[in-house]
Image: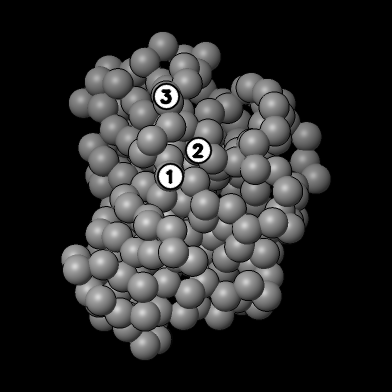
């Protein structure tokens, strides 16, 4: 399966309008934003856990990156309420589940070669980040000099420009904005190749947005387990 696999082209997906696709685990469904592969895939998805659902234990052979959108995501290491962000590098494992149900934004098999960083950011955590024009608040969730992940709050009715030297990926958490005349709402996702700046105008409610500033490089690892 190939979905939005050309990393040299800009893409915007209004994921809230996509159908849910069942996963191999009962009660776990997904909306596919980017995918290269079948059940074993390099992928960016929104995943929904029904109350009481779980995935079998598995090893993250290619790494995993998660932002919890709704509810509480759980595994044997802890509970992660909405707003939690974490990175599980290649070689880690867990048994993901949700007692009361949750929705997560997840990136699989997209860890950079040599990156073994494992972090957990609880809601509201992160380092204060510099503010650009039109941005009210910003915090960095991860920054190792080669990749930067942040959450920003954009002011209502503002023009916001995000420089793009390495490649950008973004996900709207709340509010709304327009990019190139296209209206984005919560759970809209986009990816821009290096050199193409993100130029946006926020709506009357402003916007909260997750941003990844990093090259969109493909992993060279080989999968060993059907992951989300």
Q: Which callout, 1 or 3, points at the residue further toward the start of the chain?
A: 1
Q: Which residue is mark 2?
A: 45
Cα–Cα gap, marks 2 and 1: 12 Å
In what quadrant of the picture does the N terminus appear? top right
- Picture coordinates of residue 112 (x, y %)? 69, 56
The kind of secondary structure element at disc 2 is: strand
Tag nearer the camera, 3 or 2: 3
Q: Report whether 137 appears left or right of 196.
A: left
The kind of secondary structure element at disc 3 is: loop
- Picture coordinates of residue 111 (x, y %)? 65, 51
Q: Which residue is mark 1?
A: 14
Q: Residue at x 36, y 88 (%)?
A: 133
- Picture coordinates of residue 32 (x, y %)? 53, 34
Q: How many numbered tags mark residues here?
A: 3
Q: Residue at x 26, y 41 (%)?
A: 70
- Tell me if residue 140 can be seen: no
Q: Which callout, 3 or 2, points at the residue further toward the start of the chain?
A: 3
């Amino acid at each position: 399966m190939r979905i939005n696999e050309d990393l040299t082209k800009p893409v915007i997906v209004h994921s809230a309008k996509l159908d849910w696709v069942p996963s191999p685990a009962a009660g776990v469904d997904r909306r596919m934003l980017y995918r290269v592969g079948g059940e074993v895939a390099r992928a960016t998805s929104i995943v929904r856990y029904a109350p009481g659902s779980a995935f079998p234990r598995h090893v993250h052979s290619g790494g995993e990156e998660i932002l919890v959108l709704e509810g509480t995501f759980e595994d044997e290491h802890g509970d992660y309420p909405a707003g939690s962000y974490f990175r599980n590098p290649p070689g880690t494992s867990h048994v993901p589940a949700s007692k009361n149900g949750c929705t997560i934004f997840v990136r699989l098999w997209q860890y950079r070669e040599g990156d073994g960083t494992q972090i957990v950011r609880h809601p509201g955590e992160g380092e204060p980040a510099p503010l650009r024009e039109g941005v009210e608040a910003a915090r960095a969730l991860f920054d190792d000099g080669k990749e930067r992940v942040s959450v920003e709050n954009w002011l209502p009715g503002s023009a916001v420009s995000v420089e793009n030297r390495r490649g950008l990926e973004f996900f709207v958490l709340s509010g709304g904005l327009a990019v190139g005349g296209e209206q984005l709402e919560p759970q809209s996702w986009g990816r821009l190749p290096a050199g193409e700046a993100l130029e946006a105008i926020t709506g009357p409610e402003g916007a909260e947005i997750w941003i990844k500033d990093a090259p969109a490089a493909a992993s060279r690892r080989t999968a060993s387990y059907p992951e989300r």
